[in-house]
Amino acid sequence: MPETLSIIDNRTGKKYEIPVVHDTIKAMDLRQIKVADEDFGLMSYDPAFMNTASCQSRITFIDGDKGILRYRGYPIEQLAEKSNYLEVAYLLINGELPTEGAPKDWAYHITHHTLLHENTKKFMEGFHHDAHPMGMLISTVAALSTFYPEAKNIRNPETRKLQIYRLIGKMPTIAGYAYRHRMGLPYVYPDNELSYTGNFLNMMFKMTELKYKPNAVLERALDILFILHADHEQNCSANVMRSIGSSLADPFCAMAGAAAALYGPLHGGANEEVLSMLREIGTKDKVPDFIKRVKAGEGRLMGFGHRIYKNYDPRAKIIKETADQVFEVTGRSPLLDIALELERIALQDDYFVKRKLYPNVDFYSGIIYQAMGFPTDAFTVLFAIPRTAGWIAQWQEMLLDAEQKIARPRQVYLGAEKRNYVPIEKRV
Ligand code: ACO
């Protein structure tokens, strides 16, 4: 059976054979299809990239219909149960699980790049007292580019490696500073004796104690949440990371752009929106009325639906189990009952069933974060920290892919034809 697609252009009667590789045709192969020699050639039109692969990737596999998510071939369920965030970050970026010795080396380098330049505090001070932590995080990540000008040597593997340590190491510190600034609390320096998530909890919540001791259950729960958020193939922010990176900008600037994309309420900002929604509903008995309003088009059920998952989001399943462990320590959040009721009703309602809308990763993560003591507007920051590994993996894969060039989509121009400038006194 020939691995080609036959196309007959009914405008000309001409027939074309287009190669099919990995169930894909190359959009550039359509360009030869023309009515006249001087034509530009056929393009595909795909707003929001609904059916366009922008790259070949070996990082993350998702089968949305079956609810499958794998990093470098490893099922997310196994990684969440057996691995830890730093090991998963290594896997995503380097392609393989680290062998004996390597994890220590990897963790050592990341741990020794957690400090921020002291000047960071000065511009942190410039933010308004109630500045959103994501705005502070985005700006500070971009500002790191000015501290490390050598980062622009993106073709040098050793320079790239150093920026990777810096980005993974410093993201929790920036997040900690942003939170402490918001609360009017003194900044907490990293503690190298703690784990990645233990240290993050330290930089957020340490008060007057000499040494912060993270609760082991919460530390592990956060680690699991970080694993679940580490990558998700060509989502909106990964696409931004690749796109900015394709102009050969340094990784700090590219990541600031990716984090900005994550901030939006349809992407990583959804966990914050879920909490606002649950608070607005207020009590379990108001859930049916809220669902009615969603169905009438008066807003969305935040934390539900996904562009790719048209079955259960496997991350949501793991998060629900993690929630139980967290609530044993923190006590049960009253918002959980509202969330469970929303899920129960939505999963049997025709509107949601027909549209294949299921809880996504954000539906329960916010309730866990709230129970752990994180303020609502820090939730998206909690998404950005672990996603750093995914953004870096996607960025590096793009840089090393010989087929990639500066990202530059085409458009279908529907505007005015050429017309002559009219002086203002003659305009009607
Ligand atoms: N609540 C109510 N209706 C919904 C929802 C929702 N959460 N999501 C989709 N729909 C409806 C749409 O109104 C549309 O209905 P229609 O066919 O009658 O017009 C249909 O389902 C398809 O929706 P689209 O917006 O076309 O789906 P798309 O794939 O573009 O959107 C998205 C996916 C953005 C995630 C969407 O489901 C949504 O807005 N969800 C709420 C926000 C959210 O939770 N985002 C987090 C996503 S996960 C992440 O980024 C980490």
Image (cartoon, rainbow, N blue to C red):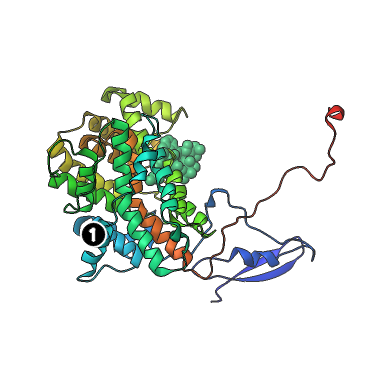
Q: Amino acid at mark 1?
A: Gln
Q: What residue is shown at x 26% (from left), y 57% (from top)?
A: 112
Instruction: Give the quarter of the image for residue 104.
Output: bottom left
Q: Is residue 19 left or right of residue 293?
A: right
Check the picture and name the quadrant holding the C terminus: top right
Give the x, y percent position of residue 69: 33, 57
- Residues 171 and 309: in front is 171
- Residues 123 and 365: in front is 123
Q: Is mark 1 within 8 Å of ligand 1?
A: no
- Residues 195 and 350: in front is 195
- For the view shown, which residue lies furthest in the right direction? 426
Residue at the spot of label 1:
78
- Residues 417 and 11: in front is 417
Task: Answer whether residue 269 is visible to the viewer in this image.
Answer: no
Q: What residue is shown at x 63% (from left), y 65% (from top)?
A: 28
Give the x, y percent position of residue 18: 62, 70
Where on the image, by quarter, is ligand 1?
top left
Give the x, y percent position of residue 306: 41, 45
Q: What residue is shown at x 20% (from left), y 47% (from top)?
A: 221
Task: Answer whether residue 122 is visible to the viewer in this image.
Answer: yes
Give the x, y percent position of residue 276: 34, 29
Instruction: Give the quarter of the image for residue 283.
Output: top left
Q: Is residue 101 above or below residue 419?
A: below
Dot 1: element: helix
Q: Is residue 36 left or right of residue 56?
A: right
Q: Is residue 371 left or right of residue 407?
A: left
